[in-house]
Amino acid sequence: MAPLRALNLQVLTPQVLQFFAAHGIISVEDFLIHDLYTLAAIAEHQGSSEVLKQAIAEILSFVDKQHAQWLTGAQLLDSIQQNKLVLPTGCEGVDSLLGGGLLEGTLTELVGPSASGKTQICLRATSHVAYHSQAAVMYLDTCNSFSSKRVVDFLDVLCKSSLNSKDQQGEFERTMKEIFHYNVFDIYSMLDLLHHTEFCMRTQDKNRNPMVRLLIVDSVSSVITPVLSGSNLQGHSLMISLGMILKKLALEYNLAVLITNHTVLDKWGVLKPALGESWKCMPHVRLLLSRDPVNDICDISLIKHTSKECHQRMIFGPST
């Protein structure tokens, strides 16, 4: 679950957070499993008792509002039939498997070993969406994999193929301003940033702020793996919290969310997605990548999709 400070509640002052921390309450999960009657009784004897009791009440109210609402079958059907846009990534093989590209409102995961092409697809999608959709792209970089040079290379091709030389520079500069890159090296900073992003989207003035259409996290496993160790319940809760906020951003704000994940070997020596069964339910779509380093040929398979036949496969070279 998210740290309490990520809730962005005005009542969570440093003094209030210090009080909670003194009683072992750091995250929302810590708060929910705590005996709140005992906590309220302790708060009653503090100098700022009213503020502390108000904080307890506001946190409970906030958490209660996050519960998913029941939907009827008609509402679910209407959601499916909405004209959600597809954002082409510019990678022919990926777009072909996905029926045109990344679907808004969907969390798509690229799974593959190191050097399988995950980051290159992310960079290509970044430049393609920023250029053709004229919308903001958020790129959360957890392992220093972002390459501005590669983005420039992709944009250079896009501009030269569709614009005359006079318009190329202006369109290039406009597109680069639509790309927002953030270095995030631990799960706590990641959760803080995503919750802040959700708060900004909920309250933003669309006429004054850029409209984000694509959110990329490259990679989720780099920030989750360090907090997972054996039966570490807090690490598991942090992983689930990260998955839920990514899905919330996709579904409630109609974003296309693209994340990358590493692979690990199972007991039979076969590569499988990292992060285990609990993470398996998070992405709506999963693509498995591998690359032949000799011929630079990428093999990509569709292994999970909520509305398409799975286990489709594409093989393509560096030009696509």
Image (cartoon, helix red, strand yellow):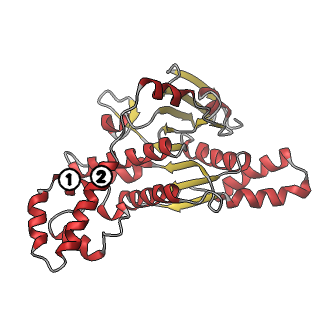
Q: Residue 174: x percent and y percent?
A: 75, 59
Q: Position of residue 186 (x, y in %)?
A: 38, 59
Q: Secondary structure at mark 1?
A: helix
Give the mark count: 2
Q: Is residue 295 left or right of residue 245?
A: right
**Residue lying farthest top?**
309
| 227 left or right of 169 in image | left
Please state if 253 lies on the left or on the right of 127 as rendered. left
Sequence order check: which comes first, mark 1 or mark 2? 1
Give the answer, above or below, for where 283 lies relative to 213.
Answer: above
Element carrying mark 2 = helix
**Residue nearer the viewer, 26 or 120:** 26
In front: mark 1 or mark 2?
2
Residue kind at label 1, given as amino acid type: Leu
Task: Compare residues 129 and 265 and report the one nearer the observer.
Answer: 129
Marker disc for residue 177? none
Residue 288 in sight:
yes
Q: Residues within 10 Å of mark 2 (few under 14, many from 20)?
A: few
The reply to whether discs 1 and 2 touch (Cβ–Cβ < 8 Å) is yes
Q: Which residue is at 39% across, 37% downward?
A: 282
Q: Position of residue 142 (x, y in %)?
A: 46, 56
Q: What amino acid type should be assigned to the residue bearing mark 2?
A: Val
Q: Quadrant of residue 189?
A: bottom left
Residue 228 in percent (x, y) is at 28, 49
Taking the spot 31% from the left edge, 34% from the top edge, the residue there is 277
Taking depth in this image into account, of 171 and 273 the one nearest to the observer is 171
- Vertical arrangement, residue 115 with respect to residue 185, above or below: above
Labelled disc at residue 32? 1
Residue, disc 2: 63
The Cα–Cα distance between marks 1 and 2, rounded to whole angstroms, is 9 Å
